Amino acid sequence: MKAVLFRQHGGPGVLEYTDFPTPEPKPGEALIRLRAAALNRMDVMVRNGWPGIKLELPHINGADGAGEIVALPKNTGTVVSGAPAETKCGNGENKLETGDHVVINANLGCGTCEFCLAGKDNMCRNWHLLGETVRGTYAQYVALPVRQLYRLPKDFDFHQAAATALVYQTAWHSLVHRGSLQKGETVLIVGAGGGVNTASIQIAKYTGAQVLVVGSEARKLKGAESLGADILIDRSKEQDWSKAVFLATNKRGVDVVVDDVGTTFMQSLRALRKGGRLLTVGNSGGPKFEIDNRFMFAKNLSIIGSTMSPLSEFTEVMDLVVAGKLKPVIDQTYSLENAASAQERLWRNENFGKITLDIPGSTGLLCL
Ligand SMILES: [Zn+2]
């Protein structure tokens, strides 16, 4: 198959578009011919590497992907040992077939540990993320356990699906399940353009919340507005944006802040009302920063972290996407061969929404 891989960590120049053996499905796995992949900042971090990272090289980036099933394990159904009983493969049915269109859930639980058996596979004791610790979706084929697949309607766009999977499950789990966001609450989203932020704006609006967005570029703020954001704060004009939030909420502060920057936590804590919740799923500004603990106890604040979502919530949010209630935003699409340019655009924060890769059709015979 064709794939984009790297044999050593480094800048975009280490990415190579080349031939690589098509993966062979293990027991319980399906083989998927990918039609679209989507980028995440994690891809670039893995490519760059960090002290202690251990990958089987060459490595293939990519957590998100959509395509069609070309091979299934025998007697599949989808009732896989250890999968939560409520696991669905899309649209309420439990059986996948060859030729089905599917989107991939990159959150790889082992299926057998105490957390997986309790339906909390995003807390799996032997957790993996597709494209981070195992080879991912910048390729024509990927093999995965069938429980990782959600069946799409045949007319659903592969790029829209690939653009959805990781960021929508992340934002859904954080806002709805961990953050218990309620109708009528106020939510501040720090940053306007990233994939999790655009998903968070839509999910918060779907929940019936009022949404404030703080961003630094007029173009991205305008985009946030088009997704339903109610109040826009331009941080290039308002250095202390927590004050602007305070004034915009009648000196009350917001109920919830979504902050995946990290280095902005102090402003976020200031922007919260007493008893407010700060939700975080990442730290694009860097992993270490200081906070003033007096804000935490004196204002009765909570910081709530989460990562990915259980399988059942992936189905919940994909059902809403397929029904057209949540609409993933695609920034630009590149050919698989040009994955390096796509990663550079993402890393420079030039995107509004998701960047996707178009996977070329396979040539030659696939022998299974
Ligand atoms: Zn597990």
Image (cartoon, rainbow, N blue to C red):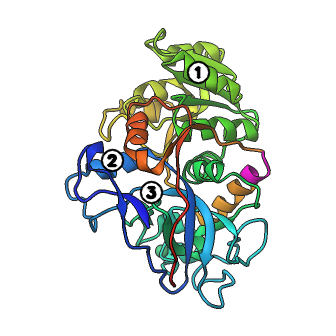
Q: Residue furthest top?
A: 237
Quadrant of the rendered image containing residue 98: bottom right
Q: Is residue 288 above or below residue 64?
A: above
Residue 45's tag is 2
Start-end of magenta stretch:
320-324
Q: Earlier in the sequence, mark 1 or mark 2?
A: 2
Q: Nearer the viewer, residue 171 or 161?
A: 161
Q: Earlier in the sequence, mark 1 or mark 3?
A: 3
- The residue at 72%/35% (across/down) is 205
Asked if residue 176 is among those painted magenta in the image, a careful observer would answer no
Q: Nearer the viewer, residue 131 or 232?
A: 131
Give the residue pinned by disc 3.
Answer: 138
Q: CA distance from mark 1 to mark 2?
A: 26 Å
Q: CA distance from mark 3 to mark 2?
A: 15 Å
Left-right relation of 11 to 43: left
Binning the other alpha carbons within 10 Å of mark 2 as few (below 14), some (14 to 19) or many (20 upward) gives some
Give the residue pinned by disc 1.
Answer: 221
Q: Residue furthest front?
A: 364
Q: Is residue 163 above or below residue 58?
A: above
Q: Nearer the viewer, residue 126 or 353?
A: 353
Left-right relation of 263 to 248: left
Q: Position of residue 195 (x, y in %)?
A: 54, 40
Q: Residue furthest left?
A: 51
Q: Position of residue 356 (x, y in %)?
A: 53, 45
Q: Position of residue 282 (x, y in %)?
A: 43, 44
Asked if residue 323 is among those painted magenta in the image, a careful observer would answer yes
Q: Position of residue 223 (x, y in %)?
A: 62, 25
The residue tagged with tag 3: helix, strand or loop?
A: loop
